[in-house]
Image (cartoon, rainbow, N blue to C red):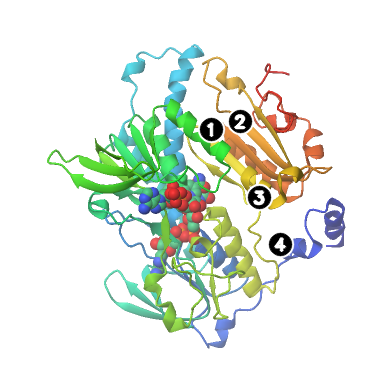
Amino acid sequence: MTILNSLCRINNLFKPLKLSENVFLVARRSLASTGTYDYDLAVIGGGSGGLACAKEAVNLGAKVTVLDYVTPSPQGTKWGLGGTCVNVGCIPKKLMHQAALLGESIHEAVAYGWEVPSLDAIKINWPALTEAVQNHIKSVNWVTRVDLREKKIDYVNGLGEFKDPHTLIATLKNGSKKEITAKNIVIAVGGRPHYPDIPGAVEYCISSDDIFSLGHPPGKTLVVGAGYIGLECAGFLNSLGYPATVLVRSVPLRGFDQQMAQAVTSEMEQKGVVFHNKCVPLSVEKLETGQLKARWQNTETQERGEDVFDTVLMATGRYALTKTLNLEAAGVTCVSNSGKIIAETEQTNVSNIYAVGDVLEGKPELTPVAIHAGRLLARRMFAGATQPMDYDNVATTVFTPLEYGCVGLSEETALARHGADKVEVYHAFYKPTEFFIPQRNIRNCYLKAVALREAPQRILGLHFVGPVAGEVIQGFAAAVKCGITMEQLMNTVGIHPTVAEEFTRLNITKRSGKDPNPASCCS
Ligand code: FAD
Ligand code: NAP
């Protein structure tokens, strides 16, 4: 313990207390054995955050139950235990993204000498793709159920709502009700896709809840919304051979570094995705052919547009599933206008009721965030730990055809927070070695480091558009968390030839006005 603490101090990585909390948590005796409540902890929602919290709590000796229930989408899609990430989020999305990348690789393989009988004959088999994806998901659902059973976490497949601050009512599949009492309750109900209030939206359109198990090929698709989900879905659909059009209300990836967002959409445009900027949907009508006629309007010019699609996918954000929780019965009042729970340290205004994950107001809606916050909360509840969740400098990646990974501040936010005089931006275009032989377009392979100008130039944000951006940014995210400076980054020896090494080669500032284009592969 002492050695670990000393090492920790030397490296200045964690505060000793935090390390000791992480490594030497002491399980407390279950309070449920006193018989006051059925459980020490009841979790509403068996997704990323809820399951992580439940498993950590049970490891620490608590008696735990998890309620999970999936209300079918308007199109009737439903799924099993595990929440959004596993069933209709990160996992099926990444698998379809991978399928799309593989399709592109077949074409590039020819340039490397692979003999492909007929490139024209290469096409995706949608039913085979969805079957493979769904089979994987079902195996994860099964493993999750077994894991809960082995950990002795009671799983209730029921829709939970509050009766009072310590009592939940679960409505089971057959309509029967079950009452559960618990000392602590965690709300981890996540969210579901929002549909704009226009004719035909709910009746005829699908959302990310439906796309990964769609029973027929999507065909020509209109994607409404240009956030994470809109761009990712448009990206993989288009690369799978289903022409995609995107309606962008304001700007793509609002809130992200806009220069990087432009690189992402410019690459998508070059691959054939059509963008209608500053456009909102007006209506979706079903034609006799079964196709969908979508109408939209440009909010600046008021010009109207329309086209016929096989599929319209709404990717216009997500709402928190708090409406059916009967929060009033528990006295939970810290709810925002949008229905999200305002809880800075995951604790609501009712001391024994907590919330984690997408249901929280103002926190990143990401699986690892929900998991980490859930685990830390369990440790605070059942092991006397004090470490709060740190929501700053959370890295993320948008899995578009050319991926975009980032951590920390965008250039815009850094300038707004610190002022243009105090911020230095290093940037470069680069050419991935693997793009040379297929002569792939490199115009959008771009990266930047946003740093304080004053030496040693602490880095505020790192941004990378290119292949495997998520893998690149993950390691650098740890460095940013440790307070890495430009000086340290420039003194880091790269791994050649990788795309990640481009961060160690950064030396041109925007302020200098020098050309950030690459000279040669080994310059
Ligand atoms: P969820 O995982 O949504 O779990 C909540 C669970 O509670 C659900 O099973 C729900 O049905 C259930 N529930 C709701 N109400 C009740 C109730 N009253 N009673 C019982 N059960 C209830 N994040 C990433 O980090 N990387 C990605 O690449 C990524 N890709 C994504 C792609 C898509 C298309 C989507 C939609 C999301 C993606 N996300 C991604 C976000 C990620 O999925 C979420 O941040 C994460 O799942 C949130 O976890 P959670 O525990 O808060 O909620
Ligand atoms: P989002 O990022 O908030 O994007 C919603 C998009 O819909 C925005 O472009 C928004 O435009 C547009 N929009 C909203 N209402 C509209 C309307 N009425 N008409 C037209 N356009 C409208 O939401 P999301 O894409 O649904 O993603 C939700 C969350 O899931 C994300 O915040 C993210 O945390 C998580 N997620 C993560 C990943 C990942 O890690 N790779 C992938 C997918 C999802 P404006 O910008 O003009 O508001």
Q: Going by the picture, which residue comes out furthest to the left?
A: 288
Image quadrant where residue 428 sits: top right
Residue 416: which disc? 3
Residue 22: which disc? 4
Q: Position of residue 260 (x, y in %)?
A: 57, 37
Question: How far apart, in angstroms, are the residues tagged by discs 4 and 1?
Answer: 40 Å
Q: Which residue is mark 2?
A: 446
Tag 1 secondary structure = helix
Using the image as rendered, state which of residue 248 and residue 350 is in the foreground: 248
**Above or below: residue 83 compared with residue 339:** above
Image quadrant where residue 63 sits: bottom right
- What residue is shown at x 47% (from left), y 19% (from top)? 108
Q: Which residue is mark 1?
A: 263
Label 1: how many residues lie within 10 Å, few (<14), some (14-19) or many (20+)? many
Which sits earlier in the primary sequence, circle 4 or circle 1?
4
- What residue is shown at x 30% (from left), y 59% (from top)? 72
Which sits earlier in the primary sequence, circle 2 or circle 4?
4
Question: How far apart, in angstroms, are the residues tagged by discs 3 and 4?
Answer: 36 Å
Q: Position of residue 315 (x, y in %)?
A: 38, 48
Question: How far apart, in angstroms, are the residues tagged by discs 2 and 4?
Answer: 37 Å
Q: Are marks 1 and 2 in contact (CB under 8 Å)?
A: yes
Q: Amino acid at mark 3?
A: Ala
Q: Nearer the viewer, mark 1 or mark 3?
A: 3
Q: Is residue 394 visible?
A: yes
Tag 2 secondary structure = strand
